[in-house]
């Protein structure tokens, strides 16, 4: 499979704090890759470097074989990468519909935008029933769904998900992941999923990387990692 996204020796930090120390990882076109690790490991920093929100201090980020290392975040979105940031930030005083329209702000094809809103409310029926409701009044799970749908309104080929299961009940986590996997299959969407919930992430992904203190300490086929005793003890509470 051709690599859609490649990180080669990427470092990044905040002032004197080094958050990423030369990490390399690949996401093949059409794949689902998980990035796992404990609090503070550098997972969100990795996604923010890809998205052009945090600058890389070393190394290169390539998308479709071209360097995107120094692009601004809007330019990264225009290339086809959208991120669902950690911790649910919907536009609270706007309706569900307005939130979805904002997700398409870099597009000008009005008919296509309307069609994609219909596609999204098809995948997330709860958003159809809450269409004119203020986004701030949605439940946590509904807000997470809206964030994913909003990110997809940019028509990305790669979606970066930062801890989609955070703070959600297990049943809701399963529901959201089922929809994400359906989108992956039916909409030709490649996924890089950051999770602390390793069990869920290993179950849906084909390949996974484990990040510790800004370094990749293990990687492999998700099914293999899920059976690995050391990984199970450290990340699966087994
Ligand atoms: N804006 C910031 N300013 C200073 N340090 C930061 C900033 N953001 C993150 N860091 C530091 O960088 C390191 C990596 O943080 P990061 O948010 O990438 O971790 P994470 O793996 O996403 O953790 P979590 O699972 O808690 O979200 C941490 O030590 C954190 O304190
Ligand atoms: Mg994080």
Image: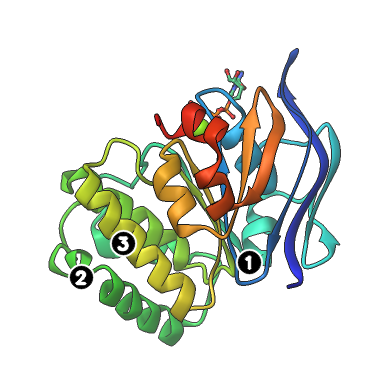
Q: Residue 80 carries which label?
A: 1
Answer with mark 2 or mark 3, whichever residue precedes in sequence. 3
Disc 1, disc 2: CB below 8 Å?
A: no
The quadrant where residue 149 appears: bottom left
The quadrant of the picture showing ligand 1 is top right
- Element type where label 3 sits in the image: helix
Question: Which circle, 1 or 3, is nearer the viewer?
Answer: 1
Q: Which is more toward the observer, 71 or 36? A: 36
Q: In the picture shown, does residue 120 fall above or below 9?
A: below
Disc 1, disc 3: CB below 8 Å?
A: no
Mark 2 is surrounded, within 10 Å at the Cα level, by few (under 14), some (14 to 19) or many (20 or more) other residues, namely some
Find the distance from the CA under tag 1 to the CA under tag 2.
Answer: 25 Å
Q: Residue 98 carries which label?
A: 3
**Going 41% across and 44% down the picture, which residue do you hit?**
199
Answer with mark 1 or mark 2, whichever residue precedes in sequence. 1
**Going 60% across and 66% down the picture, which residue do you hit?**
31
Q: Where is residue 180 in the image (x, y as percent from the top left)?
A: 40, 64
User: Dot 2 corresponds to which residue?
Assistant: 125
Mark 3 is surrounded, within 10 Å at the Cα level, by few (under 14), some (14 to 19) or many (20 or more) other residues, namely some
* Disc 2 residue: CB within 8 Å of ligand 2: no
Q: For the C terminus, give its image quadrant.
A: top left
Q: In the picture shown, does residue 216 fall above or below 115?
A: above
Q: Which is more toward the observer, 32 or 116? A: 32
* Disc 1 residue: CB within 8 Å of ligand 2: no
């Amino acid at each position: 499979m051709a690599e859609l996204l490649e990180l080669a020796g990427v470092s990044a930090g905040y002032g004197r704090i080094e958050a990423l120390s030369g990490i390399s990882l690949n996401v093949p076109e059409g794949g689902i890759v998980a990035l796992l690790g404990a609090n503070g490991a550098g997972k969100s920093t990795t996604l923010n470097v890809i998205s052009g929100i945090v600058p890389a201090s070393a190394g290169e980020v390539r998308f479709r074989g071209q360097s995107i290392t120094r692009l601004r975040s809007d330019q990264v979105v225009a290339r086809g990468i959208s991120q669902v940031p950690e911790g649910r930030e919907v536009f609270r005083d706007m309706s569900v519909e307005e939130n979805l329209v904002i997700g398409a702000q870099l597009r000008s094809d009005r008919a296509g935008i309307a069609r994609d809103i219909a596609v999204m409310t098809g995948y997330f029926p709860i958003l159809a029933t809450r269409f004119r409701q203020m986004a701030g009044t949605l439940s946590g799970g509904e807000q997470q769904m809206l964030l994913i749908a909003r990110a997809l309104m940019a028509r990305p080929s790669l979606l970066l998900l930062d801890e989609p299961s955070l703070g959600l009940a297990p049943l809701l986590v399963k529901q959201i992941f089922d929809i994400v996997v359906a989108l992956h299959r039916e909409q030709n969407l490649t996924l890089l999923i950051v999770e602390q919930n390793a069990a869920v992430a290993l179950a849906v992904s084909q390949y996974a990387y484990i990040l510790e203190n800004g370094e990749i300490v293990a990687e492999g086929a998700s099914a293999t990692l899920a059976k690995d005793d050391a990984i199970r003890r450290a990340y699966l509470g087994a």
